[in-house]
Amino acid sequence: MKILITGICGFVGSTLARALLESTPHLQIVGVDNFVRPGSELNRRDLARLGVKIIHADVRCAADFEPLPAADFVIDAAANPSVLAGVDGKTSSRQLLEHNLWGTVNLLEYCKMHGAGLILLSTSRVYSVPPLAALPVEVRQRAFRPKSGAKLPEGLTAAGVSETFSTAPPISLYGSSKLASEAIALEYAATFDFPVWINRCGVLAGAGQFGRPDQGIFSFWINSHLRQRPLKYIGFGGQGHQVRDCLHPRDLVPALRAQMKHRGDGKPRIANFSGGAASAMSLAQLTNWCDARFGKHAVRSDAKPRPFDIPWMVLDSALAKKAWNWSPKISLPQVLDEIAAHAERHPDWLEISS
C-alpha cells in the first residue's frame, strides 16, 4: 500500500509515519511538508533514514500536487491547529482559511484524480462554543467537571462530548475551517466515489511535540515548568481548573489501518478519537504533576477571559469503539512521562520548536 501524509514533518504526521512503518509490512510512505514550523527539519532527517520519501510542497498550492505520485490513501495531518489562528494577530484569517480549507480542496482534487481515499484529522473544536462555555461545572481536586445533577446540553454527558453535540457557530475561525473541510470532503466522497473518514481528535500529545501553548499545551507546560519559564493560568478565575483530555497519536494507528482497509459503507464517516475522561487533566493538576517531577514552580494568574475558551472539553469516543473496536492504549501518565523524558534530554527544545 502507498500512503501520502501531508504535514509529515510535524509532530502528528511524523509520529504516525513512524508508527505505521513499524506496524504495517510493505508500506510505502510519501510525505509532503512546507517546513515553516521550527523543528520540522529534525523530523525530516529521521524520516528519510526510515525510507520515507519527503517532498517540499504546500497544501495551499494546487500546482504542488500535480507532480506527486499516486497513493492509495491520504492522511491529512497538515493544518494550522490553533483556535486563536486568524484572530491573534500572528496569522491572518485569509491564511488560516487558505491552509485549512483550500488545502483540503486541493487534497480532495488529488484524491479524485488518483482514486485515493482520505483520512481527515479534524478537531474537537468543531463543537459549538456557547453551550460549552456556559456548561455548568463544579471544581473537584483542582479541576472542573460537569456539575452533578445539572441539566447538560444534548450530546454531552460525564463521558464527554459526542458527535451529536451541536456544531452551530460560533466555533472559531479555526473550528469553522475544519468543519467546512469535513462537509466538503463528504461531498467529494459521495460525488466521486472514494472513501473519506473524518477523525475528530482531542488534544494530541507526546514526546517531540512542538512547544507552543496554543498547539501543544501539555508539551509546552512540561518543558516550561522544567526550565522555570513563566507560566500563567488564563481565564476562569485564574486558577487553572480548565480541563482537556489528551491522546497520543500512536493510538490512532489501529483505527487508521482499519479505515484504510474499509472502502465501503456501513461505518460512520465521522467519529471522535480521544483519550476521554481517563486522560483528562486540568492545568492546575498538570502543575501538581510537574511539581512532583521537577520541583516547585510558581504559576501566575490572569483571570481575564480569552475568545473561544471553554472550561471542560473531553471527547466521548464510544462511537469509535463501536465502529472500529478502538480504544486508546497509552495512558495519561505514560504520555506525561514521555514528554518529560524528552524535555530532560533536549534542554533547548522550546528554542528549537517554538
Image: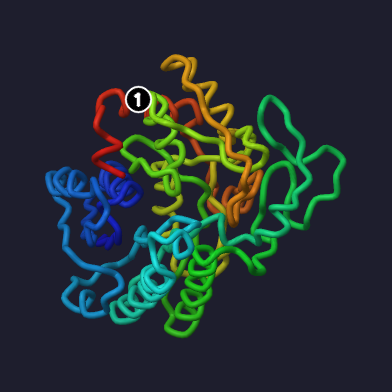
Q: Is residue 115 left or right of residue 93?
A: left
| Residue occupying the point 69% across, 61% down | 164
Residue 52 position (above or below residue 147): below
Which x, y percent locates residue 246?
51, 40
Q: Is residue 107 left or right of residue 83?
A: left
| Residue occupying the point 23% across, 45% down | 39
In the depicted view, which residue is nearer to us: 172 or 341?
172
Residue 263 position (above or below residue 336): below
Which x, y percent locates residue 256?
41, 54
Q: Which residue is mark 1?
A: 227
Give, as a three-letter code, the residue at label 1: Arg
Residue 76 position (above or below residue 256): below
In the depicted view, which residue is nearer to us: 6 or 82?
82
What is the crowding at mark 1: few (fewer than 14 residues within 10 Å), some, or many (at least 20)?
some
**How many labels sit on residues?**
1
Disc 1 is placed on an element classified as loop
- Most extreme residue toward the bottom, as rendered? 191
Q: Is residue 150 left or right of residue 182?
A: right
Which x, y percent locates residue 214?
45, 48
